Amino acid sequence: MEIESVKKIYAGYSGVYDALFKRFFHPRIKHALTSMDIKAGEKILDVGVGTGLSLPHYPRTSRVVGIDLSGKMLSKAQEKVDENNYSHIRLFEMDAMNLCFADNSFDKVFISHVVSVVPNPYTLMAEVRRVCKPGGEVVIVNHFKSKNKMLAGFEKVITPISEKIGWKSDLCMDEFISKADLSVQRSFKLKKLDFWSLLFTTNVKESGSERVSSY
């Protein structure tokens, strides 16, 4: 799916996204962020912040940058920032496959329900690994093709529907981990029969010269 198509789909959902998807997405988002042990002063990148379901779970002592491709989704997130005086959070409209940040800018990166949406998940992950510091934590919440025969059959049936709402249902976790060159510390689902997985990974890479980034 092309970038402009993704923007169009999520612009259409912006006004009803929380009502439609909060009950499905929020529990995993909350669990992931509360498990990240974000410390005072750490800089966090939230990739695909959307309407801001993740925002209440960031400590006010951290520095958070949220990005999303959809300006209309971001406007809903900005409302949450303004209403709650989240002075530690800044939001930017940005393509996750072409991040406008210097190398090694962030201590941790959170990616929620994005990997199956972007045209190229491996370009996305290359950018994420570039802007995350060596040894930093990258946490991913996403749907991957199920190994459970019953769920896999259901996924096949709903593939045409999932494509219309902007995400792919056939991304294999093992293949994704291998191609994205991820060092996975743990992966799990909140429920046995769950469509979404949580991946906690460490950004293993060679330290290069860091460029100064201000945001």
Image (cartoon, rainbow, N blue to C red):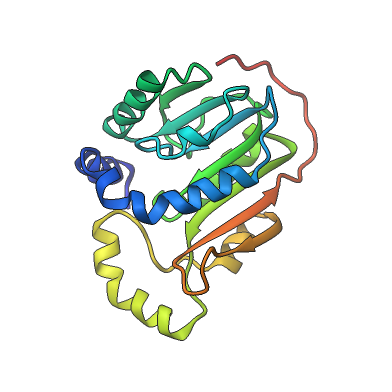
Residue 3 position in % (x across, y down): 33, 42
Q: Which of 38 and 164 lies nearest the eye of the viewer?
A: 38
Q: Is residue 39 above or below residue 152?
A: above
Q: Is residue 5 above or below residue 73?
A: below
* Residue located at (41% from left, 49% from top): 118
Write down the quadrant of residue 160 in the picture.
bottom left
- Image side of residue 208 versus residue 129, left or right: right
Q: In this view, does 4 lie above or below 62?
A: below
* Residue located at (52% from left, 36% from top): 57
- Image side of residue 7 versus residue 44, left or right: left
Q: Which of 146 and 176 lies nearest the eye of the viewer?
A: 146
Residue 161 position in % (x across, y down): 24, 65
Q: In this view, does 156 lie above or below 169?
A: below
Q: Which residue occupies the extreme right position in the image? A: 207
Q: Which of 209 and 45 lies nearest the eye of the viewer?
A: 45
Which quadrant holds the C terminus?
top right
* Residue located at (55% from left, 50% from top): 31
Residue 53 position in % (x across, y down): 40, 39
Residue 24 position in % (x across, y down): 37, 56
- Residue 119 seen by the camera: no
Q: Which residue occupies the extreme front position in the image? A: 84
* Residue located at (30% from left, 34% from top): 73
Number of numbered markers = 0
- Residue 76 seen by the camera: yes
